[in-house]
Amino acid sequence: MAEILLFHHVQGLTPGVRAFADDIRAAGHIVHTPDLFDGRTFGSIEEGLGYIGEIGFHAIRERGVRIADELPAELVYAGFSFGVLPAQKLAQTRPGARGALLFYSCLPISGEWAFGPWPDGVAVQIHGMDNDPIFVGEGDIDAAREIVAKVADAELFLYPGDQHYFADSSLASYDADATALLTARVLAFLQRV
């Protein structure tokens, strides 16, 4: 059994994010799903980004990081898109991390956006669609490939398609087949970390 801290994307803690967490719980794992937006959800990525812009990217990310202070150190950190920011920061900087699950986004481990090198012994899976205009088009796939090239226990999984939030069953971008495969891979990962 693993304990996971799962951060939502910019549209908020949607029913689809909750459903994904419930699927992981059904396999016997503990999943924490903090709401970084205080109950707000948004109908589009643009609306969610607007809200984050009002509060501040750094402030929202740090809100997520502070949530971990109330939890054990031996966590798997997971995030959907924007939620990758606090998840990856915690996986790379908080001692005791067991692993990281990065969905639709990835930050580099070198250069100005990096939190530093990837820590030894922390496994990571990165998932995205091969034609996602954000994951591929904005360069997150390059960051993912850097991690896979430099980290012993790192995997990048690409799914056919062009949707960003493909594992959120409450959104039009949902892809049931890709989500089923992603979920199976995540459960296998959680069994071994």
Image (spheres, grey):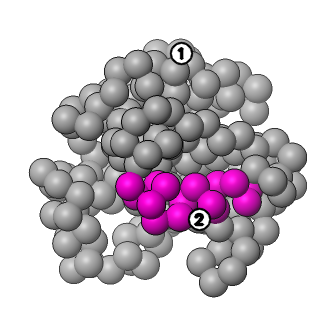
Viewer-closest of 133 and 143: 133
Viewer-closest of 176 and 34: 176
Q: CA distance from mark 2 to mark 1?
A: 29 Å
Name the residue carrying label 1.
Answer: 27
Q: Is residue 169 above or below residue 38?
A: above
Residue 90 screen position, x and y as percent: 62, 61
Viewer-closest of 70 and 107: 107
Q: Give the residue at x 69% y 80%.
A: 111
Q: Please, what secondary structure does the residue beneath circle 2 have?
A: loop
Q: Is residue 66 above or below residue 104?
A: below
Residue 68 screen position, x and y as percent: 55, 57
Query: Does the magenta segment cover residue 139?
Result: yes
Query: Does the magenta segment cover residue 144?
Result: yes
Viewport quadrant of the C terminus: top right
**Labelled disc at residue 107:** 2
Q: Is residue 15 above or below residue 63?
A: above
Residue 125 screen position, x and y as percent: 65, 41
Indicate the amino acid at tag 2: Leu
> In the visual, does 165 lie left or right of 72?
left
Q: Give the residue at x 59% y 28%.
A: 186
Does the rendering let one see residue 88?
no
* Residue range highlighted in magenta: 133-147
Residue 104 screen position, x and y as percent: 46, 48
- Disc 2 crowd, CA 10 A, few/some/many (<14, 14-19, 20+): many
> In the visual, does 139 lie left or right of 14?
right
